[in-house]
Image (cartoon, rainbow, N blue to C red):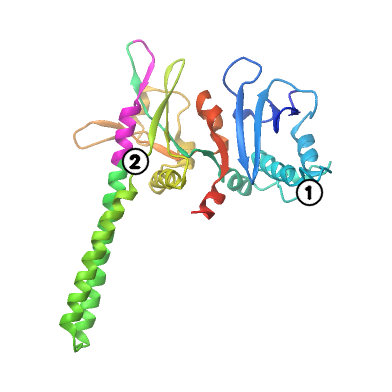
Amino acid sequence: MGGLAPNSNTDSYLLGKDIVPAMVGGSNGEFSAIVPLRLFGHDTVFLLERSSKDFPDMHALIMHTYNSDNADVRVDHLGLHKALCVLMGWNYSKPPDNSKAYQFLPADEAGANQDDLIMWPPMVIIHNTITGKGKDGRLEGLGNRAMDSKVRDIAAYISFVFLEYTRIMGHKVLHLILSEACNNRLVYSIFFCKFVIVNYYLAISHRKSQIQDLGFVGGKSKSLYGRDGHLGITLVKFGGDQSGLKEAMRLAEHFEKDNRGHKAWGRIQPLTFDRDDEKNPNLVKVDRSGEKNRILYGYLATVADLYKVDFETRKKVMIESLQEHKASM
């Protein structure tokens, strides 16, 4: 049985394929993936391998990290203990022992803990980007440029909705203020009204400038392909800074608000491409002209999605805490 072993050269651990199957993939060499994790102040590199002689299972490694007697690495080991428990869906606040009671945690709590661990730099995973089959029988889908264009369209739509909401609400507030001013017969009502009107339009102008910050200017699309062609998955990658995270979260929130987020995709996703997909209203919509368009689903990429991304991306990403980043915004 595969297991875990400390690497003597670096602060890293080797994970057997049976322990974190979601991370498995890639070449047939000694290691199938290199996954650097930066969690809770601890930097660790996980190397997936076929077998190891030291820690026979995850429980053994967690016991090692929690009960370390070395004062120099005590804090780091506790950070690693917490990270491993989150990855496995276990209770990191309960001291581990041979009863393994710490391994029991309500599914909703475990899911919330794992959702906090996002890929970094941040990215949004978009599904249902297949467009059909080519003459050679291979699956075809939206390319990088086409997806970049669609993401820009989404940004423009969000900007329009935001501006319209601001305009409508602003008019309502302005009407109420002016009505109150007239009803109370303010001594300087004329000057007051001018003051309100000027400041209202200054506020609208400011909102318009804010619209520029609502786009996804840093997002770059990467369509994923396999042996049979397009996988129907596109990664939209953002910058590894606070601005990039805000853009990624905004795009993910757009899908979630339209009921096209992670849970929605999990309910309706087809196992394989089928021509009948075009008749599924959850996958394809028909506009007034009769043109068929795929309905996109998307969400912020987390540690649980590592197996969905390509090998090159998996080698480069870090796993970081979303809550820690939000706290510093």
Q: Secondary structure at mark 2?
A: loop
| Quadrant in which the N terminus is drawn | top right
How far is the residue under mark 1 from the one under mark 2? 45 Å
As displayed, is residue 1 above or below residue 317?
above
User: Residue type at mark 2?
Assistant: Val
Q: Earlier in the sequence, mark 1 or mark 2?
A: 1
- Relative depth, front residue between 53 and 21: 53
**Drawn side of residue 58 relative to residue 222, left or right:** right
Residue 70 pos. (x, y %): 82, 42
Residue 143 pos. (x, y %): 34, 25
Residue 164 pos. (x, y %): 25, 56
Magenta extent: 136-153
As for residue 319 lying within the magenta part, the answer is no
As displayed, is residue 19 above or below residue 250?
above
User: Residue type at mark 1?
Assistant: Pro
As displayed, is residue 195 above or below residue 216?
below
**Drawn side of residue 226 relative to residue 40, left or right:** left
As displayed, is residue 129 above or below residue 99?
above
Instruction: Please identify, in this view, whether the residue under mark 1 or under mark 2 is nearer the observer.
Output: 2
Name which residue lies at 72% across and 43% down: 76
Q: Which residue is mark 1?
A: 95
Q: Which numbered tag is attached to residue 217?
A: 2
Residue 107 pos. (x, y %): 63, 45
